Image (cartoon, grey):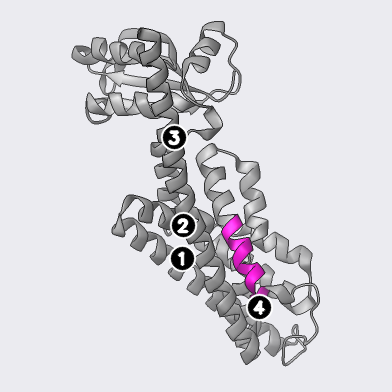
Amino acid sequence: MWRVLHLRAIVPPDRTDAVCAALSDCAGATNVVVFPGAARSPRGDLVQADIARESANEVLDALQALGIDKDGSIAIENIDLSMSEVAERAERRAPGHGDDAVVWDEFDRQVTEGTILTWSFIAFLALATQLAAIAALIDSPVLVVGAMVLGPEFAAVAAICYGLFRGQPQRIWQAVKALVIGFAAAIVITYVCALVSKRIGVIETDRLPAHRPLTAFIYSPDRWSFIVALLAGAAGVLSLTAGKSSALVGVFISVTTVPAAGNLAVALALRHGTEITGSLEQLGVNFAGMIIAGTVTLFLQRAVWSVVLRQRGRSAAERST
């Protein structure tokens, strides 16, 4: 079965029948099980069900309308393998396809976590920026790719897109703050390391190499930089909303935010003015392209899913007549 989710809810006893009725009304819900009085903290009945991914928003909205998220608990997890004919029938009855469905609460959690400015966020960003700085010094595309994959910044970029989509200035501000502080800290750390490396003789040059055919793209933005950023932003949001982690790795390898930051840090340390400007421009181009494309993608996904739901409503009406 494709993209099945497992629901586990702790429900106040006076609302168990209402929850079961909501699950019965949902075409994509099945295998409903109730354990009366099983929950101890908080106290209540345990209700479990299998849900097609494309029906997850319908179920979550119904449970939240009953206040289960406030007086009980709602948890959803992915099922790796489901062998059940009734579950397969429920998935076929559900509107659309699981890969096209956006579970908005899940996406909200993912991007919210990405905007929390933790030590690990700064550490990963600093390590990635230092890899990029070394790549700039030795003209190594392999290290550039490593820095791209290691950078943790895309979730914060997606949070900005989601904030624009939802009209939530606070979410946008939190994501921008995480990116600004994170990149500033990473660049300063890399700058200091470059200065120390130059002082002790690890870096033997006074300027970045003039001829860098393999990594010049990280400080030389052009129209292709913006086009790649647009494609990466759209692909990144799609991979997060569809749960395609393998596709997200490809997004990381497509954009040059962290490599540009690493090049900027080492260019500052070696006082290479033209590459400082180029790196800053590359950063701006990449962030602008990803934010524009990611936001547009979210609006398109909502519009497409609205069409799917309208078609489902028309089909249901035709069957009833």
Residue 58 is situated, as x and y percent measured from the top left of the image, at 36, 26
Front: mark 1 or 4: 4
Going from the N terminus, do you reach mark 1 or mark 4 first?
A: 1
Residue range corresponding to the magenta coloring: 218-231
Please tell me which of labels 1 and 3 falls first in the chain: 1
Query: What amino acid is found at the position of numbered circle 3 in the picture?
Result: Trp
Amino acid at circle 1: Leu
Q: For mark 2, does the 10 Å Cα neighbourhood hold few (<14), some (14 to 19), or many (20 or more) residues?
A: many
Mark 3 secondary-structure assignment: helix
* Residue position for label 3: 305
How far apart in space, not on screen, are marks 3 and 4 (Cα)? Answer: 39 Å
Residue denoted by label 2: 156
Q: Amino acid at mark 2?
A: Ala
Residue shown at 46%/23% (left/top)?
A: 95
Q: Counting residues from the N terminus, which is met first, the one under dot 3 or under dot 2?
A: 2
Which marked residue is nearer to the observer: mark 3 or mark 4? 3
Quadrant of the rendered image containing residue 259: bottom right
User: Could you tell me which residue is drawn at 47 percent across and 27 percent down?
Assistant: 54
Q: Which residue is mark 4?
A: 219
